[in-house]
Image: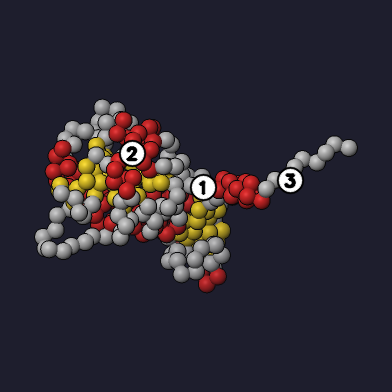
Amino acid sequence: MAPRPPKKPSWVIEKERARRAGAAETVWLFGLHAVRDALLNPARERLRLIVTRNAADRLAAEIAASGMEPEIADARKFPAPIDPQSVHQGAALEVAPLDWGSLSELCAPRGQAPLVLLLDRVTDPHNVGAMLRSAEVFGARAVIAPHRHSAPETGALAKTASGALERQPYLRVQNLATAMTALQEMGYLILGLDGEAEQTLASGIAAGAGRPLALALGAEGPGLRELTRKTCDLLVRIPFAGDFGSLNVSNAAAIGLFAASER
């Protein structure tokens, strides 16, 4: 009788379970804007659509274009597995996360001077959703965040992004500092926003004239981590009119993106 294979340690079993769960992970998008744009996105793998009769009427053209067969639900007993407090507007769509490709594919300059946004442990989905909207408006090539300790692709993020999640690349990387070094090797100048910096945002942007530019922002409160700060080429601040001032991180991103887009 052949000997039994050695029993796997519990930590190995848990790691394998987590890997399988991650591979099978899907996302529930909700809200008319988020669902509409996902239905129209050919890059989206769409799995299940639940709508009320009213939402089905409002999304009739997009549902027809997608080729999906919707499940009509009672608004009072909406069966999608989302937070009951979510403002779903009678529409929920189960999808696979988007695959935006590699950093080099997305951010290679190709004779241009692109703009990207780097997020260092910004975990609030509402902030990230708002920054995706700003990134799309001001023409950023990508929004880049670490895979861990960042806001994942969720229904709340998609709803705040109001459709931008379907169009604005949101790339989550294994190591942010490594990604920053790769950008620098492509010719990017990386500006880290820091309220204590000596240089202003305007002077930092001027220093990068003609070059690809990346803006790095940290979470509210802690700001940029030490390694992220050291990897930046310059630290810059948004000047305030008074002695004291502070901005929500999504507002700071919008100001930085606007200023950089005016180069």
Question: What residue is disc 3 on?
Answer: 7
Residue drawn at x 58%, y 46% as measured from the top left: 19
Residue type at numbered disc 1 = Ala
Depth-wise, is mark 2 or mark 1 nearer the camera?
2
Residue drawn at x 48%, y 51% as measured from the top left: 63
| Residue sitting nearer the eye, 114 or 80 | 114
Residue type at numbered disc 2 = Met
Distance CA(mark 2)–CA(mark 3): 41 Å
Residue type at numbered disc 3 = Lys
Question: What residue is disc 1 on?
Answer: 96
Is 183 displayed left or right of 52 in the figure? left
Q: Residue 202: name its quadrant.
A: top left
Depth-wise, is mark 1 or mark 3 nearer the camera?
3
Instruction: Name the quarter where the C terminus is drawn.
Output: top left
Say whether disc 2 or disc 3 marks the residue closer to the N-terminus: 3
Q: Position of residue 66 (x, y in %)?
A: 48, 47
Question: What residue is disc 2 on?
Answer: 180
Instruction: Name the quarter where the N terminus is drawn.
Output: top right
